[in-house]
């Protein structure tokens, strides 16, 4: 079973994502960007779903650090905003894809499968 690290500070958002993912994937959580970097190293996930707005360290900085450490896994940014500027920032930080909340289960599943098949 592939492992997905979900970096998400908001409890209800994490619960929703874990329900969407847990039948097909092993799910691990980070509560902020710093923890996302630590869990990336400890847990060696196959993919990260990265909330952008998080305390301690945001998802953009966490993504930059993971890329600097050599992480080549797919990282999908999750954000409350659908603005082009946010999308650009996510791609510049090293994210492979971008999804605006609210997260729709079928769309997320499709995006995950697409990145696992690339
Ligand atoms: Mg957040």
Image (cartoon, rainbow, N blue to C red):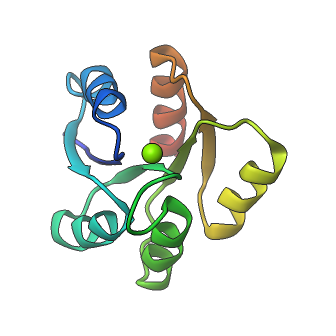
Q: Is residue 100 left or right of residue 61?
A: right
Q: Residue furthest front?
A: 55
**Percent x, y for residue 68?**
49, 84
- In the image, residue 86 sits, relative to residue 23, either above or below, namely below
Q: Is residue 24 left or right of residue 111?
A: left
- In the image, residue 67 sits, relative to residue 14, either above or below, namely below
Question: Which residue is drawn at the image coordinates 32% and 63% (left, top)?
Answer: 36
**Percent x, y for residue 50?**
45, 51
Q: Residue furthest right?
A: 84
- In the image, residue 7 sits, relative to residue 104, either above or below, namely below
- Looking at the figure, which quarter contains the N terminus? top left
Q: Is residue 55 left or right of residue 96?
A: left
- In the image, residue 84 sits, relative to residue 89, either above or below, namely above
Question: Which residue is drawn at the image coordinates 31% and 27% (left, top)?
Answer: 12
Looking at the image, which is closer to me, 52 or 1? 52
**Percent x, y for residue 52?**
53, 52
Looking at the image, which is closer to me, 74 or 13? 13
Question: Which residue is drawn at the image coordinates 73% and 49% (left, top)?
Answer: 87
Which quarter of the frame holds ligand 1?
top left
Residue 54 image-quadrant placement:
bottom left
Question: Which residue is drawn at the image coordinates 43% and 81% (left, top)?
Answer: 70
**Percent x, y for residue 5?**
29, 50
Number of labels in the image equals 0
Residue 92 image-quadrant placement:
bottom right
């Amino acid at each position: 079973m592939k492992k997905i690290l979900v970096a998400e500070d908001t409890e209800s958002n994490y619960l929703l994502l874990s329900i969407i993912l847990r039948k097909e994937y092993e799910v691990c959580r980070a509560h902020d960007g710093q923890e996302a970097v630590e869990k990336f190293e400890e847990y060696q996930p196959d993919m990260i779903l990265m909330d952008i707005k998080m305390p301690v360290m945001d998802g953009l900085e966490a993504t930059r650090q993971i890329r600097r450490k050599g992480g080549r896994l797919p990282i999908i940014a999750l954000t409350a905003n659908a603005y082009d500027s946010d999308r650009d920032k996510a791609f510049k930080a090293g994210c492979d894809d971008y999804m605006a909340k609210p997260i729709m289960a079928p769309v997320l599943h499709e995006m995950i499968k697409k990145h696992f098949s690339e």
